[in-house]
């Protein structure tokens, strides 16, 4: 079984074109979010395209980001292939960006914006700047050890699959967390299977790796969600035939602030999941959005067919308005439906 092939990852321990300039998306309320793309001192000298791009969404991470990025780099070196690490600072409220820049590692870059927007927003920004053939993400606090990304990369190289996800519910995973959370996790998975028919036992663990074509197809169609972004990615991917997903075991070192459950977070996750199911099953929203983007690609006059957007189309007009000369988004097709 492929799912068991990489059980040895359970050990403890610490897009295109060139790197893109800053984007300036909008907050849901309409206010502009200033985005700053900060490269480490020698990043611009790197010319070799990475095989793997790993996005690390970070929030209030100054205390641990340097050590954790070093750990990620050390583990990814086991691949023997070029890679890049993109730290997205989801709210510039401390000196996380400066600490990343201070590492001076040419494989590491940082992007920051002023106000916290949520993990899904941060991941979309990071993926838009990723250049690798394989693109994934891992939570910057390293609750899940980065060796899972190495195992995922090997699986994608050896098997005809579309994505690999770390799973708390894999038989070989080593996870310690309260029983009430296990019950909630099981109930959520049953809801996901019933409402979305996504055959993944754990959609929410923050360790995933995709073939580039999966995210190139899916990201432009998303509505960024703070609580159910990972689920939306997997649900839309499955809708478009990217349903060859394997799960690998993880060792989860969860840093609980307490054993209580955030009832508001549970409610929002539940509502976001139902909203995704509504768009997939009843409105066919993602398919209609994809059709609209494809029509826009070819209706560009006498020029060549345009590429799909590199960010969700719901934000595309804002990107174009704020950065009209940015080659990362200039001339991209599509408007939301």
Image: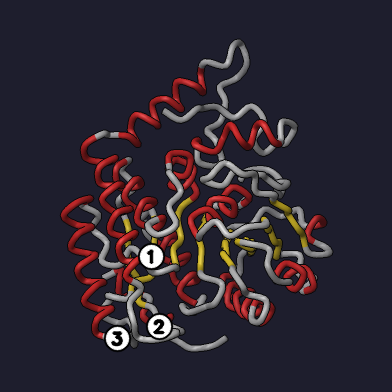
Q: Residues within 10 Å of mark 3 (few under 14, many from 20)?
A: few
Q: For this view, does 65 lie left or right of residue 181?
A: right
Within 10 Å of disc 1 (Cα), the crowding (few <14, some 14-19, many 20+) is: many
Considering the image in quadrants, where does the N terminus appear?
bottom left
* Residue 249 image offset from top left, x and y in percent: 35, 77
Q: Is residue 98 above or below residue 125?
A: below
* Mark positioned earlier in the residue sequence (3 or 2): 3
As measured in the structure, the alpha-carbon distance from the residue carrying label 3 to the one carrying label 2 is: 15 Å
In this rendering, the count of numbered labels is 3
Q: Quadrant of the C terminus?
A: top left
Quarter holding residue 31: top right
Q: Nearer the viewer, mark 3 or mark 2?
A: 3
Circle on res. 104: none
Which structural element holds mark 2?
strand
Residue 83, can we see it? Answer: no
Mark 1: secondary structure: strand
Q: Earlier in the sequence, mark 1 or mark 3?
A: 1
Residue at x 25% of width, y 46% of height: 277
Q: Nearer the viewer, mark 1 or mark 3?
A: 3
Q: What residue appears at the point 67 percent right and 56 percent down from the top-left corner?
A: 113
| Residue 165, disc | 1
Q: Label 2: which residue?
A: 251
Q: Position of residue 193 (x, y in %)?
A: 19, 57
In the figure, is residue 302 to the left or right of 326?
left
Residue 97 quadrant:
bottom right
Quadrant of the rendered structure where residue 38 is? bottom right
What is the number of the mark on residue 178?
Answer: 3
Q: Position of residue 258 (x, y in %)?
A: 40, 86
Q: Earlier in the sequence, mark 2 or mark 1?
A: 1
**Whole-percent x, y for residue 254 in the image:** 43, 83
């Amino acid at each position: 079984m492929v799912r068991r092939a990489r059980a040895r990852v359970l050990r403890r321990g610490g897009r295109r074109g060139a790197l893109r300039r800053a984007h300036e998306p909008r907050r849901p309320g309409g206010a502009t979010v200033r985005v700053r793309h900060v490269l480490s001192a020698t990043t611009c000298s790197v010319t070799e395209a990475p095989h793997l791009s790993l996005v690390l969404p970070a929030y209030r991470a100054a205390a641990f980001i340097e050590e954790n990025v070093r750990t990620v780099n050390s583990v990814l070196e086991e691949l023997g292939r070029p890679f890049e690490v993109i730290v997205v600072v989801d709210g510039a409220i401390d000196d996380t960006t400066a600490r990343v820049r201070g590492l001076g590692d040419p494989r590491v870059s940082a992007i920051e914006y002023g106000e916290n927007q949520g993990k899904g927003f941060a991941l979309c920004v990071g993926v838009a700047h990723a250049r690798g053939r394989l693109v994934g993400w891992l939570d910057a606090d390293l609750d899940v050890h980065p060796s899972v990304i190495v195992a995922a990369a090997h699986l994608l190289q050896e098997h005809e699959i579309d994505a690999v996800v770390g799973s708390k519910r894999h038989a070989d995973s080593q996870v310690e967390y309260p029983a009430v959370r296990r019950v909630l996790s099981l109930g959520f998975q049953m809801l996901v299977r019933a409402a979305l028919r996504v055959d993944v036992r754990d959609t929410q663990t923050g360790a995933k790796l995709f073939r580039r074509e999966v995210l190139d197809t899916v990201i432009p169609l998303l509505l960024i969600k703070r609580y159910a972004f990972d689920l939306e990615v997997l649900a839309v991917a499955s809708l478009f035939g990217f349903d060859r997903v394997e799960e690998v075991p993880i060792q989860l070192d969860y840093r609980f602030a307490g054993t209580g459950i955030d009832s508001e977070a549970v409610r929002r996750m539940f509502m976001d999941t139902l909203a995704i199911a509504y768009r997939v099953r009843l409105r066919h929203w993602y398919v209609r959005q994809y059709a609209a983007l494809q029509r826009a690609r070819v209706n560009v006059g006498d020029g060549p067919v345009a590429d799909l957007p590199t960010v969700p189309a719901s934000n595309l007009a804002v990107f174009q308005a704020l950065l009209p000369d940015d080659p990362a988004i200039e001339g991209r097709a599509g408007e939301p439906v």
